[in-house]
Image (tube, rainbow, N blue to C red):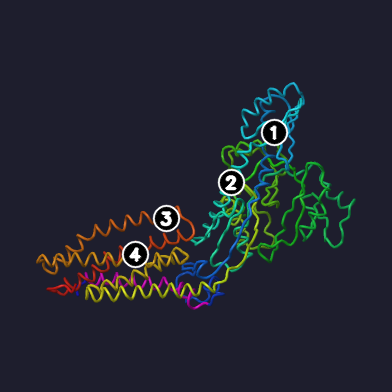
Amino acid sequence: MDRGWWWKFGMIVAVTLGTLWFLVPTYYSLVVLDRAERNNIAVLEQRLPAWAPPAKYRLNLGLDLQGGIHMVMRVDTKTALQKRTERRGTQIATYVNDKKLGEVTADTDPERLQLTLTAKDPATMDAIQKEVLATFTDFSLESRNGGTLVLKPDEGQVNRFRDEAVDQAMLVIRRRIDKWGVAEVDVRKLGTDSIQISLPGRSNPEQAKELVGTTAQLEFRMVDDTNPQVFAQMFQQNPPPAESNITLVEDEGFPQLSSPNREALLAYAKDKAPEGRDVVTECVPSPVKKNDCIAYRSYLLDKNVPLTGESLAGADASVSQMNEPEVNIAFDPAGSREFEKLTEAAVGRRMAIVLDDNVHTAPRINEKIGGGRARITMGRASGRSFEEWLGEAQTLALVLKAGALPAPVTVGEIRQVGATLGDELIKKGSLAALVGLALVIVFMAVYYRKSGLIADVALLLNGLLILAGLAFFNATLTLPGIAGFVLTLGIAVDANVLINERIREELSHGKSARAAVDQGYDRAFWTIFDAHVTTLIAGFILFFTGTGPVRGFATTLIVGLLASLFTSIVVTRVITTYFVHGRNAQSVSV
């Protein structure tokens, strides 16, 4: 064997050994570890040999094969409509005043979804009514009485907003899950205001709730600094019950209520805040337990919400020049104008960044902020390591980057799905694949003799390459994925059948063994290539447009087709050409 053949065979051996090496984490995850430890990457990292690839490169099993978490999310479109009506009231009043059509105040009735505009001068109401109805077409006239105008959202707009809120919530949730890697997640609409989610491989319902249930209702609200002693007066005039553990603390010169029980704190402050103000809490993070709060502190915020996360265009975590984690946020053009106007009118005041009804930070506005960009500093380290500190910034950026939900989303149902049926499906699916593979191997060996055995070697390598490719993308294997696996093996066999028949045809025309092999592969190449490319196009369409099992099938199909091209065109040709050219064979066993 000359040096050229050693290089070609060395390449095939290297690919095979590399494939087997890459499948080590998958083997340990699915065979060595038991079901309880299968999805624990920390345990897998400990069990893997030092020479093995990182534990993240492993093949997972889908919900139908190993169980997981089943969730039903409720989209609160009613609350979203109420908040939207309140924001539109503020926008309409600001628009009228900026246009100098007159001076108006806006009041909303959240339950009836009504917006009442009251003009200081009733004589200006005719011009105001005409301009408002022409500009804000999503509202219609309910009634008018002198200088008072009552508007309500258009019914068609309301129905469309509800449908769009659920659709957008589905899109946002799917994006969040996708940011954790390729996963066989099924997200679908359930009824008119619910979303059904299946999370395969998740065994911790609380972790799943944290992953999917974070609604990211981001609001920018002004802190009421006009009466810094409001909580101190509240505490002195109405002492809280001892069992609530509510105390009075001071932060940057502002007295605040503090308690380890958020519900008790909010219940105590309810109906005690000044008119037009809300009491919202801030989490004091635990220095020991991640994502835990050792206490909650109170903030007095303006009830008006001038800007929300709907205007957010992007967010990313970084480290400042002071070596402190921060989250940089950017607004869309409309949000940029609102944010600039908001900061210009509130220089010297504190602006609370509220995420899901919790104050995340409340920086002081030192100057007007233009350009639509701002930073959320992560506060004090509070005994956390820098990695944990930075991790919190990255988590916040991940949630914000996924998009703000148009309506609050709550967990209506969450349960763990057992894998008893999955074990049976794994056995049946694996048995079907092995039986089919064995029958194909036997047929190829009997019908095409030595060429059939070469095709069988390529077929086995093709299967290993598919599994390694899926492991590389950390994909999730389900029953449709197994179907895609078997289908691609059939396509790989078909390519070898085409090549062998071409060689037979060339031999029947009196060609020599060398010429028959060379021309057989050359003439079959474009037919095989065209067939694989057209199927790849269909696979990519399924991958980018499908969800859940359809996407899993497409993933397996794409990886399998690429592996089939390599094994049928490269691997079998190298081996066949070696036996014919390298050994000067006068015939081909085909």
Instruction: Point out the tag, 1 or 2, that comes first from the N-terminus.
Output: 1
Residue 188's tag is none
**Depth-wise, is mark 2 or mark 4 nearer the camera?**
2
Check disc 4 and report the residue beneath it.
563
Mark 1–mark 2 contact, CB under 8 Å?
Answer: no
**Mark before the other along the chain sequence, 3 or 4:** 3
Magenta stretch encompasses residue 30? yes
Q: Secondary structure at mark 4?
A: helix
Around disc 4, counting alpha carbons within 10 Å, would you say few (fewer than 14), some (14 to 19), or many (20 or more)? many
- Magenta portion: prevailing SS class: helix
For the residues bearing labels 3 and 4, Cβ distance under 8 angstroms: no
Q: Are marks 2 and 4 in contact (CB under 8 Å)?
A: no
Q: Please rate how many residues cluster around mark 2, counting C-alpha atoms within 10 Å: few if below 14, some from 14 to 19, many from 20.
A: some
Q: Quadrant of residue 480?
A: bottom left
* Dot placed on the residue nearer the N-terminal end, 2 or 3: 2
- Three-letter amino acid code of the residue under disc 2: Asp
Amino acid under disc 3: Leu
Q: Residue at x 45, y 58 (%)?
A: 551
Q: Is residue 515 left or right of residue 201?
A: left
CA gap, disc 2 and disc 4:
42 Å
Q: Nearer the viewer, mark 3 or mark 4?
A: 3
Quadrant for the C terminus in the image: bottom left
Membership of 568 in magenta stretch = no
Residue lying farthest right? 237
Q: Which residue is mark 3?
A: 542
**Residue 548 in the image, given as x and y percentages of width and height:** 49, 59
Q: Residue at x 87, y 61 (%)?
A: 242
Instruction: Give the residues in magenta.
Output: 4-33
Name which of mark 2 and mark 4 comes first in the sequence: 2
Q: Where is mark 1, residue-wise? A: 151
Q: Residue furthest top?
A: 123
